[in-house]
């Protein structure tokens, strides 16, 4: 395929931008790929029981997905396996042509983080993290991993964060916004403690199947389009919980990236939370700073799925409100809604602005320099 | 503009599509009930290869509980983000005035007529007794 670069986006060849892509999804060819990385204590369980999640859905999603494997139709590797399972094909289709300097892997499947059997969950998370290290990080120096943790068992999560941080190669601890309780609740604090202690960024990728309706209490919705839209407000609810529970005061060096939730809601959330904080200080004594300061100073946000206002110039307003130093490019390759860095965010930007969004902000939050 | 012979008509059965390259440009050619159509192989949204998209019909509903499905196979659904384009015109269904895939005139022509010229056959040798798909680029 040949693609002409939009002339508005063209940059001089000598100023070519190398990208950091904050959201690339690798996947196992089958869950059997993980068995060699799983603690042998759990092999019999793996063979006999396998996946059993906190939600009723184990091998399926509660909402229909628009494409097979949720992926772009052109991302199925010619050598077989699902999209995202073949490193060579990923290099040829994504890393090389888009000049990706560093890509952050986010493993979604298998959902080791949400096994109902907590012992198995911890073992399977370790297997996923070791699989990433051996099959991806050791073979491709442009890639960084994400530490998968058992979110409902924060003690084991903290131990896994320590283990992986000692090894290196991981850009972040990966969590999801939909848990059994709102993410700011104290049962989850050991995860934040470990992330801060090991100076590793907390990345919150949308999702998490907890069995509850994704609408936030309005009942189960009908369409994938509704579920997809719910990602933004699930992230809002999670951040609201973390801010009002005082997480960012308790862990003053915690850095966090909101991944794949969009951007348009961010400034409005800050305005609304500031308003509530001013009126209900008595209920929230642990919150010592305006919530918008936390959103502005402790959070980073990835671009995909890129907001597409009717007038693209409104993206500049959005970046002004959120902060040009807070927005990080992500492709979501190979998923159906992935963004092509040559075409996403079609708005006039200076070279410095483009460099910040497509590279430098992610280098900063993930300490990749 | 020149007329390019891109395929033998028999190579592209009804309902199928093929990506061809004409003057360095990738073009998706479609057989729709025996008629041929051609669109640039690049989605106007983010550049996805349109020729790999699914061909679907037009689903509509003019009141709750009442659905209709028509024009089977006449819409092309982008293989990335799912924008739908009319294979006949290249117009997107949701924003026809803003997003449009470039369409090229495509016709079925007999070898006997083609040999009178003018035409360009870069990789398809033309024989008098065959039929061909010709795209104007």
Image (cartoon, grey):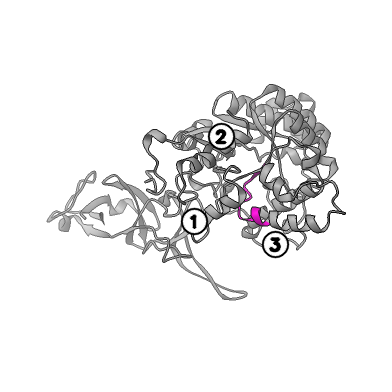
The chain ID associated with circle 2 is A
Question: First in sequence: mark 1 or mark 3?
Answer: 3
Task: In the rendered view, tell whether residue A131 sits above or below residue B105.
Answer: above
Task: In the rendered view, tell whether residue A155 sits above or below residue A244.
Answer: above
For the residues labelled 2 and 3, the Cα–Cα distance comes to 34 Å
Report if residue A29 is visible in the image: no
Task: In the rendered view, tell whether residue A269 sits above or below residue A37.
Answer: below
Q: Position of residue B18 (x, y in %)?
A: 36, 50
Any magenta on residue A261?
yes
Q: Where is residue A326 in the image (x, y as percent from the top left)?
A: 61, 43
| Mark in front: 2 vs 3 | 2
- Residue beneath disc 3: A221
A29 or A301, nearer to the observer: A301
Dot 1: few (<14), some (14–19), or many (≥20) neighbours within 10 Å? some
Q: What's the magenta region? A: A257-268
- Residue beneath disc 1: A313
- Residue beneath disc 2: A103
The reply to whether callout 1 and callout 2 are in contact (CB within 8 Å) is: no
């Amino acid at each position: 395929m040949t693609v002409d670069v939009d002339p508005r986006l063209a940059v001089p060849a000598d100023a070519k931008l190398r990208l950091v892509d904050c959201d690339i999804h690798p996947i196992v060819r089958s869950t059997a790929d993980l068995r060699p990385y799983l603690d042998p204590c759990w092999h019999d369980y793996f063979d006999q029981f396998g996946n059993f999640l906190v939600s009723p859905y184990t091998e399926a999603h509660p909402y229909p997905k628009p494409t097979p494997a949720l992926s772009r139709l052109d991302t199925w590797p010619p050598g077989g396996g699902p999209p995202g399972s073949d490193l060579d094909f990923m290099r040829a289709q994504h890393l090389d042509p888009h000049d990706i300097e560093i890509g952050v892997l986010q493993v979604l499947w298998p959902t080791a983080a949400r096994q109902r059997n907590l012992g198995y969950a911890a073992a399977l998370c370790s297997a996923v993290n070791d699989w990433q290290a051996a099959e991806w990080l050791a073979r491709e120096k442009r890639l960084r991993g994400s530490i998968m943790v058992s979110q409902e068992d924060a003690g084991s999560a903290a131990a896994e964060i320590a283990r992986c941080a000692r090894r290196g190669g991981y850009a972040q601890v990966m969590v999801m916004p939909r848990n059994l309780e709102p993410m700011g609740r104290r049962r989850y604090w050991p995860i934040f403690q470990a992330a801060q202690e090991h100076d590793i960024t907390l990345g919150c990728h949308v999702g998490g199947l907890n069995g509850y309706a994704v609408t936030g209490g309005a009942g189960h919705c009908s369409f994938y389009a509704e579920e997809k839209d719910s990602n933004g407000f699930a992230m809002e609810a999670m951040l609201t919980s973390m801010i009002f529970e005082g997480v960012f005061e308790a862990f003053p060096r915690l850095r966090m990236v909101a991944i794949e939730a969009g951007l348009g809601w961010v400034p409005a959330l800050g305005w609304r939370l500031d308003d509530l904080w001013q009126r209900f200080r008595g209920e929230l004594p642990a919150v010592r700073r305006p919530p918008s300061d936390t959103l502005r100073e402790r959070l980073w946000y990835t671009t995909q799925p890129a907001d597409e206002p009717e007038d693209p110039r409104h993206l500049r307003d959005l970046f002004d409100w959120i902060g040009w130093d807070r927005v990080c490019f992500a492709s979501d390759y190979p998923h159906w809604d992935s963004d092509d860095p040559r075409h996403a965010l079609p708005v006039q930007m200076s070279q410095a602005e483009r460099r910040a969004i497509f590279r430098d902000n992610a280098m900063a939050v993930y300490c990749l320099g | 503009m020149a007329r390019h012979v891109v395929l033998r008509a028999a190579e592209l059965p009804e309902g199928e599509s093929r990506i061809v390259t004409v003057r360095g440009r990738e073009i998706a050619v479609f057989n729709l009930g025996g008629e041929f159509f051609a669109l640039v192989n690049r989605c106007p949204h983010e550049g996805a290869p349109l020729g790999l998209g699914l061909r679907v019909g037009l689903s509509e509903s003019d009141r709750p509980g009442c659905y209709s499905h028509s024009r089977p196979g006449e819409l092309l659904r982008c293989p990335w983000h799912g924008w739908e384009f009319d294979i006949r015109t290249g117009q997107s269904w949701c924003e026809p005035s803003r997003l449009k895939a470039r369409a090229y005139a495509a016709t079925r022509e007999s070898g006997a007529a083609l040999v009178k010229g003018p035409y360009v056959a870069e990789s398809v040798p033309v024989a008098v007794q065959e039929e061909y798909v010709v795209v104007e680029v």
